[in-house]
Amino acid sequence: MADADTTGLVEDLFRRESAHLVAALTRLLGPSNLSLAEDVVQDALLRAMDAWRFGAPRDPKAWILQAAKNRAIDIIRRDRRLARLPELESEWTLPGAVASALSPAEDAANQLAMMFSICDEALSPETHITLILRLLCGLSPAEIARAFLMDTATIDRRLHRGRARLQGLGHLHDVSDPRDVCARQPSVLHALYLLFSEGYHGSDAENPLHPVMCSDAIRLAELLLASPATDHASAHALGALFCFNAARLSTRLDDAGILVPLAAQDRAQWDRALTERGVMHLAGASAGHRLTRWHLEAGIACEHTIAPSVQETNWARIVALYDELLAETPGPIVAMNRALAVAELRGLDEGRRALQAVASDEKLSGYHFFWASLADIERRAGRPTEARALYERAMALSRSPAERGAYQRKIALLED
Amino acid sequence: MAKFTFIFHGGAFVTPGLSPTEMQEHLNKWHAWVATFMKAGRHHVSQPLENRGKIVRGAERIITDGPFAESKDLVTGSLTIEAASLDEAAVLARDCPIYEFDGFVEVRPILELER
């Protein structure tokens, strides 16, 4: 045992290992034993926490792996029905078979199999993302409930539904089967998109950013790219979108926890390494035959992230991309964002007209950001009275101190 | 300086359903607490215990399973430290993270036979 104060544990070690091992054990024991796999992992982590209280071992990852391995071998010995494979039946081959199933070399394949099995067409996208957070990100039902602002019982019900479906599968979907991959890839990408969005502007308005979810979404998207079977242009596009947005994550909130508008963010603080990763993925995305919404959204995010300032942003290209996106996935939020880009490209009057054209939409009329955007335009057009009334409307609709604070600031600026 | 043993009962180690993040954060708090003894130069010996065991009892020396992890006051380990007095040792035990999950610490002076 090393001294406690000289051995810092890798951040997220427990969460990551939980995700690795749940996927590996579920693949080994079969999805009908999903709950058992989760229990084995919980037990291994609990033992680690217990044993390491006075100092962590030299190789914590290997320690957890060994604990899970021992426990798995133990339960297979005790219940021979768990020995689904011939190599698990013989005492001679059992330890080796468990070791190779749990080996880090299998991590990517295990987690991809879990991801594709979760994204089942019989389950809703909400259940997909809930299962991903539970099984592939190692979040507890209570942690998932907090992020979604829901009660734990609702999350438990979703997990129960999802688990029941998974447990009915004879085996996890192997991504080596191209039919499964083609059929499920779109819902996998959509689930990862929801995961990232939840981290980037989450349901919990009091605490809207969850960088952990963003980095997990990037990690899982890059797992897709690391396997030839799932390395599709659309997955690259999604990876690019995540990287461009994540590069700007650190400047979205100020020290007081107030949302900072794009124009006021310190671009020098944006993460260059992530931007470069985004550019790399965008190049990979262009290899495809089909332009997906992820391509278009990645293109827009790219223009924002590489621009030196709001004024020097390529608004013409952004508006063109929004036009295509509106045709691909029509919706009020896309229309609103397009209108904001129009205001930058063709002037405030055109922008105002484009916003007013969608104001009757029910979703937008109850959305604080819509009224704040209109207020921004009036403020810039030199109409402070109109702007103030609109900011107040936005404030009345906003959900959190972070949002209200941002609008209060804008009203205060009007008075200068 | 006299020696005292902290006997840890219950806490996170017998709490079901902790998330991986909660476990790791809790563990970090233990490391920070144990590090304070090292920094203060207090000699210490620690001993975590597994959550399983056997109990041997009675004139018949009957062996049974137990104690069980479900027991809220299960002994989960011990730590022996040096302190000036029992009162000081008890104060040191107040900073232990065990209370976060409803555990408790029993502070016992070590009986030195040869003085």
Image: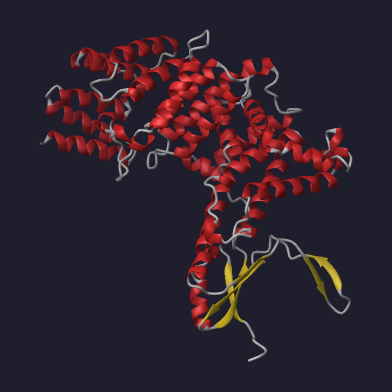
Q: Residue shown at 52%/17% (left/top)?
A: A234
Query: Residue at 71% of width from left, 50% of height from top?
Result: A67
Q: Residue furthest bottom?
A: B115
Q: Nearer the viewer, residue A329 or A76?
A: A76
Above/below status of A291 relative to B103: above
Q: How many marks?
A: 0
Q: Please, is residue A364 above or below residue B63 in the view? A: above
Residue A351: percent from the left, percent from the top? Answer: 23, 16
If the image is split into quadrants, where does the C terminus of chain B sit? bottom right
Judge left or right: residue B26 versus residue A397: right
B107 or B114, which is in the foreground?
Answer: B114
Of all residues, the one furthest to the left in this rendering is A416
Q: Is residue A215 left or right of residue A46?
A: left
Question: Do we see residue A151 in this rendering?
Answer: no
Residue B94 screen position, x and y as percent: 49, 71
| Residue A190 point in image, percent of width and height | 52, 23
Residue B97 position within the rendered picture, expressed as x and y whole percent measured from the top left = 52, 63
Q: Quadrant of residue A163?
A: top right
Q: Is residue A234 visible?
A: yes
Q: Is residue A148 above or below residue A372?
A: below
Q: On the rendered structure, is A312 left or right of A194?
A: left
Q: Quadrant of residue A313?
A: top left
Nearest the eye: A220 or A75: A220
